[in-house]
Image (cartoon, rainbow, N blue to C red):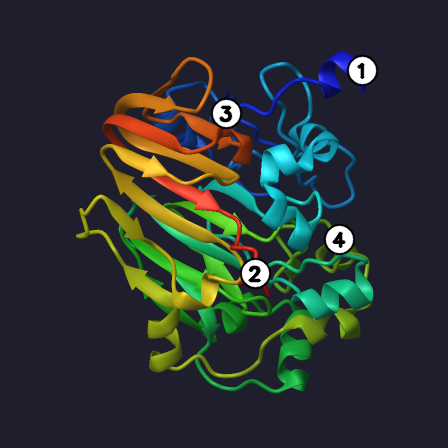
């Protein structure tokens, strides 16, 4: 990196769509939100302000700033400006966050993600992949997500389903949950899950691309690509095989569609060690923090401590560095603000 680039200040910036090719269809809802022509058949994910590359890739998935730098490199060059001293003391130069727009043009396969401990032992990563979904749109007759087993399942049963690729048994074993805009779902690492066709979400994740794809036939080329290169027995250690009863599900799911106060906390309490998200209506004052801002509706401006206001409209996605200081949203806006965990609450 040149000394000129490395000296550039950390500034809030609007980001273009960043849609690495995926194995499943979707993208029309992303294009409709952003007002562009990004609805490639296999462009169902827009990785927003991403410093995470796709598994097995060097740069695919990484976001670029308007000046052409990879956001990952800019953060690495000046982590305190981008992330703040408290954050860097806890997480180093990692943003500790990956945000996506995900438009399921078809049902996703049944899969799960490793937790921090498994990722440290087997994948050389501090982070596993706990995630959360904020439903921002739905289409079709039956928008649903599938979350957690309805009953306890033995390891032998899971292994047999995977060996025979029994899709109906895997999907049928999960809780089916109807969703509508404003609903949010916290998905702890290890939870078997699938997102149904026609569900459009803002997805917050720990900053990895680790998936254990239990139902790979018809989606992926082979089992090796489904299990991150791990042997099947090791990969299946990630699966939480315990029952997700009504009480547990109610602790993971929030219904916020009717809430219209200025700041609406979106995620379940259990999400706090992993990430934070709020829906903001109208003008708002924002404390200094690394953040990802997604404009769902309206027009307005983002005012930072220095520089000209950033113009915002429906579909704008913005990365906000800690160095932007106390910022202000002005205008008739509905936005989602995604942030890493506070330094004292991380998992």
Tell whether 277 sits left or right of 167.
left
Whole-angstrom CA distance, mark 1 to mark 4, is 37 Å
- Element type at marker 1? loop
Q: Which residue is mark 4?
A: 225
- Give the residue number, with chain letter if any, for mark 1: 2
Labels 1 and 2: the sequence-earlier one: 1
As measured in the structure, the alpha-carbon distance from the residue carrying label 3 to the one carrying label 1 is: 21 Å
* Front residue (pair 244, 214): 244
Q: Earlier in the sequence, mark 3 or mark 1?
A: 1
Q: For the point 45% across and 68% down, which residue is it? A: 270
Mark 2 lies on residue: 130
Which corner quadrant of the image does residue 35 belong to?
Answer: top left
Mark nearer the N terminus (3 vs 4): 3
* Badge 1 vs badge 4, beta-carbon distance below 8 Å: no
CB-based contact (under 8 Å), mark 4 and mark 2: no
Crowd band around label 3 with a 10 angstrom C-alpha radius: few (<14), some (14–19), many (20+): many
Examine the rendering and report whether any part of residue 260 can be seen: yes
- Residue 42 horizontal side relative to residue 230, left or right: left
Give the CA separation, mark 2 to mark 3: 27 Å
Residue 20 position by quadrant = top right
- Which residue corresponds to the image point at 78% horizontal and 72% vertical from the top-left? 234
How many labels sit on residues?
4
Look at the image and tell me in which quarter the N terminus lies: top right
Residue drawn at x 56%, y 60% is: 130
Nearer the N terminus, badge 1 or badge 4?
Answer: 1
Residue highlighted by disc 3: 12
- Between tags 3 and 4, which lies in front? 3
- Measured Cα–Cα span from mark 1 to mark 2: 36 Å
């Amino acid at each position: 990196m040149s000394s000129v680039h490395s000296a550039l200040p950390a500034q809030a910036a609007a980001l273009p769509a960043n849609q690495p090719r995926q194995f499943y269809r979707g993208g029309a809802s992303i294009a409709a939100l952003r007002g562009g022509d990004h609805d490639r058949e296999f462009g169902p994910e827009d990785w927003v302000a991403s410093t995470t590359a796709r598994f097995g890739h060097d740069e695919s998935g990484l976001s670029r700033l308007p000046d052409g730098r990879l956001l990952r490199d800019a953060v690495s060059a000046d982590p305190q400006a981008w992330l703040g001293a408290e954050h860097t003391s806890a997480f180093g130069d990692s943003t500790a966050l990956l945000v996506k727009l995900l438009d399921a043009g078809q049902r996703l396969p049944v899969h799960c993600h490793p937790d921090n401990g498994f990722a440290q032992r087997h994948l050389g990563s501090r982070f596993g992949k706990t995630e959360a979904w904020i439903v921002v749109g739905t289409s079709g007759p039956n928008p649903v997500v599938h979350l957690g087993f309805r009953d306890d399942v033995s390891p032998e049963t899971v292994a047999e389903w995977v060996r025979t690729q029994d899709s109906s048994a895997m999907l049928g074993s999960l809780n089916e949950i109807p969703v509508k805009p404003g609903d949010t779902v916290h998905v702890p690492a290890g939870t078997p899950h699938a997102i149904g066709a026609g569900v459009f979400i803002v997805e917050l994740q720990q900053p990895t691309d680790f998936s254990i794809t239990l139902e790979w036939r018809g989606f992926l080329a082979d089992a090796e690509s489904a299990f991150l290169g791990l042997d099947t027995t090791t990969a299946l250690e990630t699966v939480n095989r315990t029952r997700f009863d009504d009480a547990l599900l109610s602790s993971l799911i929030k219904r916020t569609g009717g809430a219209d106060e200025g700041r609406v906390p979106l995620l379940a309490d259990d999400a706090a060690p992993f990430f934070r998200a709020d829906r903001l209506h109208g003008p708002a004052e924002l404390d200094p923090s690394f953040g990802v801002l997604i404009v769902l509706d309206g027009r307005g401006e983002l005012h930072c401590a220095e520089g000209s206001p950033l113009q915002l409209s429906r579909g704008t996605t913005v990365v906000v560095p800690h160095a932007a200081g106390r910022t202000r949203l002005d205008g008739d806006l509905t936005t989602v603000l995604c942030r890493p965990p506070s330094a004292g609450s991380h998992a």
